[in-house]
Image (cartoon, rainbow, N blue to C red):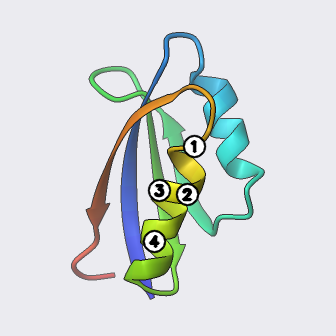
Amino acid sequence: MVQAYVLINTKPGKEKEVLEGIKKMGIKLLDSSLLYGEYDIIIKIDAENIEKLRSIVLDIIRKLDGVERTITLIAAIT
């Protein structure tokens, strides 16, 4: 298993909409928060492997309306 934190920037005013969209996508979401500061959302996800993680970020999260940018941090020790 691979755990990762994904930092997400959204278009202004789209933070809640994007987070709700992520929650509806069937991703194994371990935690999530709306943020103040440089990033708008942080999520912690669990994926079967690196390829599945790539697919979640590129094919699901980045394609959501309102997402402008993501940064993925893979946990070294879980």
Image side of residue 24 versus residue 1, left or right = right
- Say whether marks 2 and 3 touch (CB < 8 Å): yes
* Kind of element beneath mark 2: helix
Q: Which residue is mark 4?
A: 53
Residue 33 lies, in percent from the top left, at 51, 39
* Kind of element beneath mark 1: loop
Tell me the kind of residue under disc 3.
Leu
Work out whether mark 1 precedes mark 4 in sequence or the reverse, and give the earlier one: 4
Q: Quadrant of residue 30?
A: bottom right
State which mark lies toward you, 4 or 3. 3
Q: Check disc 3: other Cα within 10 Å, few if <14, some if 14-19, many if 20+.
A: few
Tell me the kind of residue under disc 2.
Asp
Residue 38 lies, in percent from the top left, at 27, 24
Q: Residue at x 55, y 49 (%)?
A: 61
Which mark is on residue 63?
1
Q: Distance from label 2 to label 3 (Cα)?
A: 4 Å
Image side of residue 39 versus residue 22, left or right = left
Tell me the kind of residue under disc 1.
Lys
Name, please, the residue furthest toward the right.
24
Q: Check disc 4: other Cα within 10 Å, few if <14, some if 14-19, many if 20+.
A: many
Work out whether mark 4 precedes mark 3 in sequence or the reverse, and give the earlier one: 4
Name, please, the residue furthest toward the top.
12
- Say whether marks 1 and 3 touch (CB < 8 Å): yes
Tell me the kind of residue under disc 4.
Leu
Q: Which residue is mark 2?
A: 59
Q: Residue at x 21, y 78 (%)?
A: 76
- Say whether marks 2 and 1 touch (CB < 8 Å): yes
Which mark is on residue 54?
none
Work out whether mark 2 precedes mark 4 in sequence or the reverse, and give the earlier one: 4
